[in-house]
Amino acid sequence: MAKRTTAAAAHWEPNDGEDGSGALEILELLAVQAPLDGIDEVLLRAHDRGATADELAAIHRAGRLGRTVHGLLDRRRRREADLAALLDTARELASSCDVDGLVKTVAHRTRALLQVDMAFVALLTTGSGDSVIRASAGATTSLHIGLQLPGKHGIGAVVRETGAPFWTSDYQSETRVDHDPELDAAIAREGIRSVLALPLHHASGTVGVLYAAHRDVRHFEPDEAALLGSLADLAAAAVDKAQWLELYNAEVAKLEEHSALAMETIETERWLEAVRDHIIGFALSGQGVAGLAAEVGVLLDAEILVRDHRGRILAGREETWPPLPPPTASPRTPMLLDAGTWQAAIWAGTTWLGHILARPRTALTPEGERMLAYAGQAVALAVGVGRGAAGVGGFDSRCV
């Protein structure tokens, strides 16, 4: 952290030592937050003016104490700055519900707080501890986002097993870690020497590991681990919340999709019901099989042919159709005869009367198949109406 000189320190004038109180000068320097080299100047002036041995001893002791106080104040200022940064991070994490955005913020904050070369966040992907790097900060090529990390090797395995921070000043020679050749090679390519790792642990369990890495040998201090531990706790809570929210949103999306499909199905059923009512109503109107076949052709955008159980054509133009197989009783469900011809049986109760055939101009949809089945039922009704009007039995031309 850069030395800070206050406005008071900028206007401070050194005591010329007439009162012999070099110790007081040092106190004044501390009071105005002057740089440490001011203490050395006090000592030099005391020597220059010929201070006695007792005075010099007192001034040297005051200098040592001054440096101690200066260090304490400096650490306090750093601690305040760190806490302010953590507070800003907490606000930023609380305002975001996107996992990738959260871990990216955590990686950048980690690098800034500890002044390291790189920082990574790896989130667990399996119950065995395998993880994937979801965010990184600092120049890196090998340890990139999306890299899979083994669950049983490396510092991450130690951190997950102990649930405590782990740091090393020289990873490649670290004997407390079960090394993985591929992972070691990637770390070597990045030139990483020092690593500090902490678990992202929340009430529901560990969600990942936070890494701070440096390319030089560095002995991380306990207070640095404690600071990063606070950040890791904030990150774990935020990531856990975001992951649950992602699962919730995914379930909501599925429910919405199912709801939309259900509504679409309901609308389709309503439409098919209306089509069926229209076809049945047309059959009961007395316009005969020919009129009904023409109406079905319009609805299906298809060429329609109706023939009885003997193969006689009751509606449609036979000459436009390819040779058809002899009529035989078939199930009530429409069936595809060839690449372009559909057939639906005409049944009146248990009596098979014939077939209605369709050649759609476009591929027949499932809804179209059901419409063709309705057409078969409607033809049977039209035949019944024709029989009643003619006063005779049978399925003949007078019913057409």
Image (cartoon, rainbow, N blue to C red):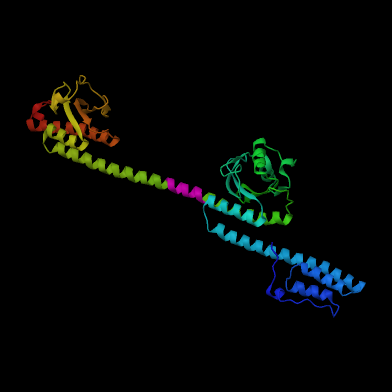
Magenta part of the chain: 245-254
The quadrant of the image that shows the C terminus is top left
Q: Residue furthest bottom?
A: 19
Spot occupied by residue 67 in the image (x, y as percentages of width and height): 79, 66
Report whether residue 209 is seen: yes
Above or below, 330 relative to 234: above
Report whether residue 152 is seen: no
Q: Residue furthest right?
A: 53
**Count of picture labels:** 0
User: On the image, which quarter does residue 351 sit in?
Assistant: top left
**Camera-nearest residue between 272 and 207:** 207
User: On the image, which quarter does residue 44 sit in?
Assistant: bottom right
Q: Residue at x 36, y 46 (%)?
A: 260
Q: Residue at x 46, y 47 (%)?
A: 251
**Camera-nearest residue between 306 and 227:** 227
Q: Is residue 248 magenta?
A: yes
- Dominant SS of magenta comes to helix
Above or below, 243 relative to 173: below
Spot occupied by residue 76 in the image (x, y as percentages of width and height): 71, 65
**Camera-nearest residue between 196 and 6:** 6
Spot occupied by residue 317 in the image (x, y as percentages of width and height): 13, 27
Above or below, 266 relative to 365: below
The quadrant of the image that shows the N terminus is bottom right
In the picture, measured across the screen, residue 392 lies left or right of residue 271, that is left
